[in-house]
Structures are given as C-alpha cells and as structure tokens.
Image (tube, helix red, strand yellow):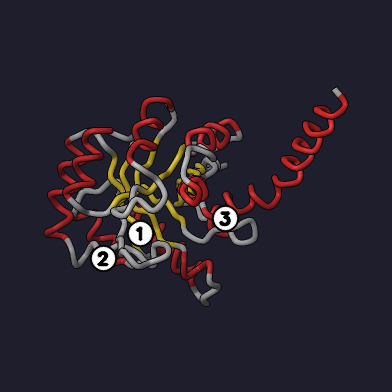
C-alpha cells in the first residue's frame, strides 16, 4: 500500500493584526502576540508582508518576530533593493517574492516571473546565498512555473485568488500546476482568498505542501472570538463593583 502524503503545513499571515493596530496607533493588538497564539494553536509558521508603504507590518514587527520566534518566518516582499537588504539583515527562514502595487487593496495576481527574469535572477541568487529559502508567488501557469525553475527558486506559491472567486476550472488548473511544480523539482505552496468553505479541495491536492492563509483567519478571530472577549470584560466590570 502506498504511503499517504503528509498533511499540508499551515502558515498564518498576521498582517491584518497590524492593520487593526495601525488604525489607532500604539502597540495593541500586538502582531507578535498574535503570532504566538497562532503557533500555539497549531500553525506551522508565520507569514508577514512588509510592504513599501508599511500599511500594516512595520520593520520593528519583523525584527521582534525574528528575535522572539523559533518557528519559520515567511517574509512576503516586493522585488526591490530595499527589501532584499532588509531580508539579508533579518534573515527570515523564507522570502516569498510577490508583485506589489501601491494602490492595490491586496495582492491582485501572481508575479510575472517569466517576464521579469532579468530582475528576479540576481534577487533570487542574493537571497539564496544569504541562506534564505526563496519562493515566488505566481499564477498556476506552466510558463511561470518553468520560469521559477529556471531562476532556481526552490519554492512556488500558487495564487488561489481565481479559485476563491469560483471561476470554473480553477481547481483543476491548480492541481495540474502543483503536479508540474513537483515534476520540476519545486516545492508547491498555495494561498490567497482561502476560507473555511473552500480550503479543503486545495488542501487535498497531493502536491501542495503548504497553505498560507491570513485575512480570513484574522476576520474569523474577530467575529467568532468576540463573545469570549465581551464575557471576560463584563466579568471584570462586575467583579470591580462587587469587590
């Protein structure tokens, strides 16, 4: 009987804990505390995106997590000299190179690795030489997968946004891309727009080694964890009067 493939790892993106913090300034809620809670609850690693405009995660968040956590940290970053230098200075376990546009609300699609090989090749080489595992966030397209292999990036992360929008044929496209990634010697991850309702078919793909999920989990934590927080605050208020 063939052995079963291991369950896909879960990376939790804590960017939007920082988004909430930044709405008021100060230090609460703390992305590092959220990362610790996620790891204690079973996450295999932490993902954070240090954007050019610092709209959520800040530089000190990355530094604090790198100093405090032993679990893998996956830094999402644009292909810029600034981000390469930050990555080489902090040395996270992995860096996922993503497309980044100033006016987008969230990442809108995969990186054009095939069209940007001249830009990406020295960045992949520099990060790899620094002991950082490089991932490219790409659409599930054979040309992009072959470009990633040519760039010698050991990991690809398939953009699941079109699948999350229920576009016909996207699950098959993801499965075929994941299989091609394995055939090319690439480790395959997946993420973007995954929820309780749609994660299972992607998690079942045998060639997907890791799922990275953030926005939905943070939203679910706010909604489904609010009752317990209110109960605790109510008890503290009651106890203060009764004491």
- Give the mark nearest the N terminus, 2 or 1: 2
Of the two numbered discs 3 and 2 in the rendering, the one whose residue sits closer to the viewer: 3
- Which residue is identified by label 2? 112
181 up-or-down from 18: above or below: below
Residue situated in front as seen by the camera: 15 or 171: 15
Measure how far apart labels 2 and 1 are at the Cα level.
Answer: 17 Å
Q: Residue 226 carries which label?
A: none
Across and down, in percent, residue 129 comes to: 17, 36
Residue 216 numbered tag: 3
* Picture quarter with the N terminus: top right
State the residue at coordinates (31%, 54%): 53
Earlier-in-chain disc, 3 versus 2: 2
Residue lying at the far bottom in this picture: please name it.
168
233 sits to left or right of 192: right
Q: Is residue 13 visible?
A: no
Q: In this view, does 108 lie to the left or right of 239?
A: left
Q: How far across and how far down the image is residue 187, in percent?
A: 36, 47
């Amino acid at each position: 009987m063939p052995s079963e493939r291991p369950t896909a790892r879960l990376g939790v993106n804590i960017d939007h804990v920082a988004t909430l913090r930044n709405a008021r300034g100060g230090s609460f809620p703390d992305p590092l505390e959220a990362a610790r809670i996620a790891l204690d609850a079973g996450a295999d690693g932490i993902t954070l995106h240090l954007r050019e405009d610092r709209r959520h995660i800040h530089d000190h968040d990355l530094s604090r997590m790198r100093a405090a956590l032993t679990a893998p940290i996956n830094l999402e970053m644009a292909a810029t000299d600034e981000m390469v230098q930050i990555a080489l200075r902090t040395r996270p376990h992995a860096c996922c190179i993503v497309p980044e546009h100033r006016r987008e609300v969230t990442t809108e699609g995969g990186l054009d690795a095939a069209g940007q090989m001249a830009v990406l090749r020295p960045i992949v080489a520099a990060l790899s030489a620094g002991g950082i595992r490089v991932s490219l966030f790409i659409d599930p397209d054979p040309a992009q997968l072959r470009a990633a292999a040519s760039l010698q990036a050991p990991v690809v992360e398939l953009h699941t946004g079109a699948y999350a929008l229920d576009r016909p044929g996207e699950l098959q496209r993801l499965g075929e891309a994941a299989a091609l990634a394995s055939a090319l010697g690439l480790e395959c991850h997946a993420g973007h727009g995954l929820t309780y309702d749609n994660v299972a078919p992607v998690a079942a793909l045998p060639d997907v080694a890791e799922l990275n999920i953030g926005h939905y989990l943070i939203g679910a934590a706010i909604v489904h964890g609010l009752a317990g927080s209110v109960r605790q605050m109510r008890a503290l208020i009651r106890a203060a009067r009764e004491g």
